[in-house]
Amino acid sequence: MMTAQWLYGLTGCLIVALGLRGALLHDSLLQRIVAINVMGAGVFLLLIAVAYRGPGLAPDPLPHALVLTGIVVAVSATALALALVRRLHAERDDD
Amino acid sequence: MNTASLLVFDALLMLTLVGLAWAALAGSDERLSVILFIAFGLVLAVAWARLLAPDVALAEAAIGAGLSGALLLSAVGSRPRGASRTRASSMQNHTEEGNTRVLQWTITLLCAALAGILAWALLHALDIGPTDMLPQAISANLATSGVSNPVTAVLLNFRAYDTLLELAVLLAAVLGIFALGPATPGYQPAGPVFDGLVRWLVPVLILTAGYLLWVGAHAPGGAFQAGAMLAAAGVVLRLSGRSSIGLPNGLTLRIVMAAGVGMFLLVGLTLLVLGRPFLGYPPAWAGTLILMIETAAMLSIAATLLLAFHGGRPKSHALAARTESANAATSNTCNEEQTP
């Protein structure tokens, strides 16, 4: 077992928890979206850490492909969420 | 580099990452959160490069930090300053404040417990050690996949279903954005310095997109990174206040938006008719088919991301002219009503 895997993996766990806490506790919708993105980044860090095999060795490409898919899905979900937030604020300003 | 200095580098990198994540989520200033989140994404890209995941590093820098950051920043910019603090006065009396504190601590403890469980699962998984069945299957079949970059092989061949559905998710998201209303108004025309930069930057971005698309077959790169580059060219054009940001209008736009899913389905169904499994490319044709799908996917991804940054359906020129004349008519009648 390698120290790098431990270090990056455990950081991933910590970042997932930080992101979830932010998503649950923030008042601002925009900051909640940022928090969910941070949480996603933690999950990606966990996956890439598991894929790592050490210096000079080829890492497992499957988690890499999963994370690539994840990044694109995350940005499209973020875009939709931001459009919803913009619409919500527009509705609120009309009142 | 020796092991000790590498370890110091790892530790510093992870410390920076946790610090940035903490700082991005600590305050109540939205703008600060977004800016720190962009920094977090860029540091994360360094971590991907360190863990030998260059494909992911490129995507993170271009999409995760770059375009997400641009989207979030434009969302902050479109709102008046201080609008996020309207609910700060909701904590009026002490009991309510006490309740909020209890809630905060409960959530913090539960999140810490989650981190603990995840860490336990991770250490357990690392203890067992990696099972190299899947990586071995990938490297054994790489020769017949049509490409030599294993990540592209997984995305476009071995698990092409995943990527097809991912493009469908992108399409669904952009349709949702369309449904929520018209595009936000554009930006002010840029000054001469930025305008000069744009003239250089946009062609370079388009060229880089083409390069990344082509090189993805055997080196880090591919449709996602290339699509993000193309979208970035459009974002730069929009920031400089151009009325045209390179998106087509009407039917052409719709075709470009659906091109990724469409090309995937076309290839898959054609193969099905020819008696092969759905998306089971014949090895001799795999490289060509993957490049065709990736080109269409790149255009779709770029259009989707750019429309997301645009914030809605772009007005067609005819419609824009009609709305403007309607507005002019309304303001005229208002003036006439006010004059007497």
Image (cartoon, coloured by chain):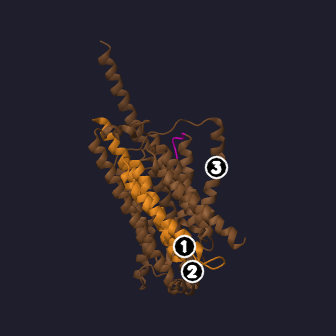
Chain colours: A orange, B brown
Local packing at callout 3 (Cα closer than 10 Å; few below 14, some 14-19, many 20+) is some
Q: Quadrant of the N terminus of chain B?
A: bottom right
Helix, strand or loop at mark 1: helix
> Viewer-proximal residue, A72 or B188?
A72
Chain letter behind tag 3: B
Label 2 in the same subunit as label 3: no
Give the alpha-carbon distance from disc 2 to disc 3, as whole Å: 45 Å
Q: Which amino acid is tagged 1?
A: Trp
Q: Which mark is residue A6?
A: 1
Instruction: State the residue at coordinates (49%, 72%).
Output: A47
Instruction: State the residue at coordinates (34%, 48%).
Output: B180
Does residue B142 appear to the left or right of B84 in the view shown? right
Give the alpha-carbon distance from disc 2 to disc 1, as whole Å: 8 Å
Label 2 in the same subunit as label 1: yes
Ranked by sequence position, the earlier of labels 2 and 1 is: 2
> Viewer-proximal residue, B112 or A73?
B112
Give the mark toward the camera: 3 or 1.
1
Chain letter behind tag 2: A
Q: Which residues are magenta?
A: B241-246
